[in-house]
Image (spheres, grey):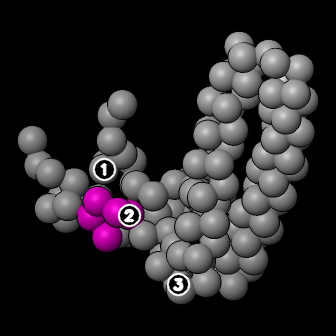
Amino acid sequence: MTHPIHDATRPVAAPLSVAQRMCLQDLLDEEWRAQVRQLTGLATAYHSAESAGDDRGTDQLSAALAVVRRRLIDVEAALARLESRTYGVCDGCDRRLPFEQLEMNPLARFCTGCQPVC
């Protein structure tokens, strides 16, 4: 099997247009706002559970907070890559990701050929 990095038969995605970059910026900004809202709500619930001595509730909320924090970090990293013009480049093979893939998943870091299986 040919490794995706060395597969010259795969088409190369076109560079992002200004309109596409703006669209993706808007999607990432909205995702950032949604994660901040979720983080705020979970933090409030966590403190309420902690004040009530609800250990089970604080454990569950702590796990949920960790997931949202990780997602927020991922969104901020994508925004930084967009600003530095490295956004939309596969971490595995350095090929540009198609706009359609980024539109569906603005946090995508791998092309379909390099996507880790987990």
* Marks 2 and 3 in Cβ contact (< 8 Å): no
The residue at which mark 1 appears reads as: 114
Q: Determine the CA span between mark 3 and mark 1.
A: 20 Å
N-terminal-most mark, 2 or 1: 2
- Farthest residue toward the left? 1
Q: Quadrant of residue 46?
A: top right
Q: Quadrant of residue 56?
A: top right
Q: Quarter of the image containing the C terminus? A: top left
Q: Secondary structure at mark 3?
A: loop
Can you say whether 45 is above or below 87 in the image?
above
N-terminal-most mark, 3 or 1: 3
Residue 98 position within the rendered picture, expressed as x and y whole percent measured from the top left: 51, 62
The residue at which mark 3 appears reads as: 85
Q: Secondary structure at mark 1?
A: loop
- Please tell me how many numbered marks the rendered image carries: 3
Whether residue 100 is visible: no
Q: Residue at x 67, y 32 (%)?
A: 62
Residue 7 position within the rendered picture, expressed as x and y whole percent measured from the top left: 18, 58
Tell me the amino acid under the disc marked 2: Cys
Q: Determine the CA span between mark 2 and mark 3.
A: 13 Å
Q: Quarter of the image containing the N terminus? A: top left
Tell me the amino acid under the disc marked 3: Arg
Q: Residue at x 22, y 54 (%)?
A: 4
N-terminal-most mark, 2 or 3: 3
Query: Residue 88 bears which disc, if any?
Result: none
Residue 34 position within the rendered picture, expressed as x and y whole percent measured from the top left: 83, 50
- Residue span colored magenta: 90-94
* Marks 2 and 1 in Cβ contact (< 8 Å): yes
- Is residue 84 highlighted in magenta? no
Q: Quadrant of residue 42?
A: top right
Residues packed near mark 2 inside 10 Å, few (<14), some (14 to 19) or many (20 plus):
many
The residue at which mark 2 appears reads as: 90
